[in-house]
Image (tube, coloured by chain):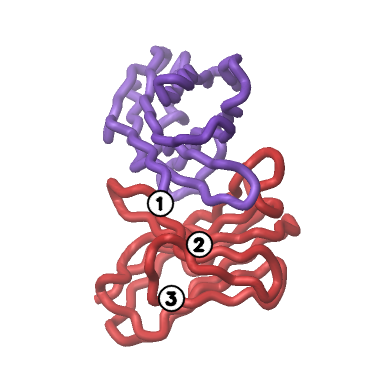
Chain colours: A red, B purple
Amino acid sequence: EADIYQTPRYLVIGTGKKITLECSQTMGHDKMYWYQQDPGMELHLIHYSYGVNSTEKGDLSSESTVSRIRTEHFPLTLESARPSHTSQYLCASSVLAGGITGELFFGEGSRLTVL
Amino acid sequence: AQTVTQSQPEMSVQEAETVTLSCTYDTSESDYYLFWYKQPPSRQMILVIRQEAYKQQNATENRFSVNFQKAAKSFSLKISDSQLGDAAMYFCAYWRGVGNQFYFGTGTSLTVIP
């Protein structure tokens, strides 16, 4: 299995709370991603990073923010959670720009429910 | 943005039989990569198989093979001798290469019947 870890796996919180979803990888990959996954929908890229101190927004508008202070760590934060944020969030990593293989390595996901 | 279409939300197959999952995509590019990813329930999504568009030969990985039809923009996955462990969501994905995003389909949920 890939060495990429997400916590928490499941989270139920009330509206207005601040939450941080953690993602760590031990493969030394430069590029990291956050995807949003909803049933019956394609995965949507919400944030990505090319390396330390590099973060970019993806094609899906998101009220979340990310940081990349260390290569192995790419947390996602919601300052004030709303029911519309209820979803599964997948973290992934790859060698820079996908490398020659293009393989993404995924975490197990964080399922967020906002009441 | 690129589009990847998986028209089969759900499929089922008897154990030991063969099943084919469909995927079509839209692109004006000639060089790109196509992937099938597998997501078992509550587990990590993993790469099943990869196809480079410049290669005419269809990729094969053990019981998994693809039928890549570049002109038709079709990329189907064939699973032979299906096993219970093959039950999962399968996502087709398109990638233009270095510096570009991945685009995923909506997935096909595969059930394997004992």
Q: Which mark is residue A4?
A: none
Q: Describe the element under mark 3 as helix, strand or loop.
A: loop
Residue drawn at 38 percent across, 19 percent down:
B20
Residue placed farthest to the right in the image? A28
Indicate the position of residue A32 as horizontal and vertical percent values: 61, 60
Horizontal side of residue B42 vs A72, given as left or right: left
Crowd rating for badge 2 (residues with CA inside 10 Å; few <14, some 14–19, many 20+): many
First in residue order: circle 3 vs circle 1: 1
Q: Where does residue A1 sit, x and y in percent of width and height?
A: 63, 45
Which three-letter amino acid code belongs to the residue tagged 1? Leu
Q: Residue furthest front?
A: B28
Q: Quadrant of the C terminus of chain B?
A: top left
Look at the numbered discs 2 and 3 and tell me whether their residues touch, using CB distance below 8 Å. yes
Q: Which mark is residue A43?
A: 1
Q: Secondary structure at mark 2?
A: strand
Kind of residue at disc 2: Trp
Q: Which residue is mark 2?
A: A34
Residue located 61% across and 43% down the image: B97
Tell whether label 1 touches label 3 (CB within 8 Å).
no
Judging from the image, mark 2 belongs to the subunit labelled: A
Q: CA distance from mark 2 to mark 3?
A: 10 Å
In 3D space, how far apart are the residues under numbered discs 3 and 1 (Cα atoms)?
Answer: 16 Å
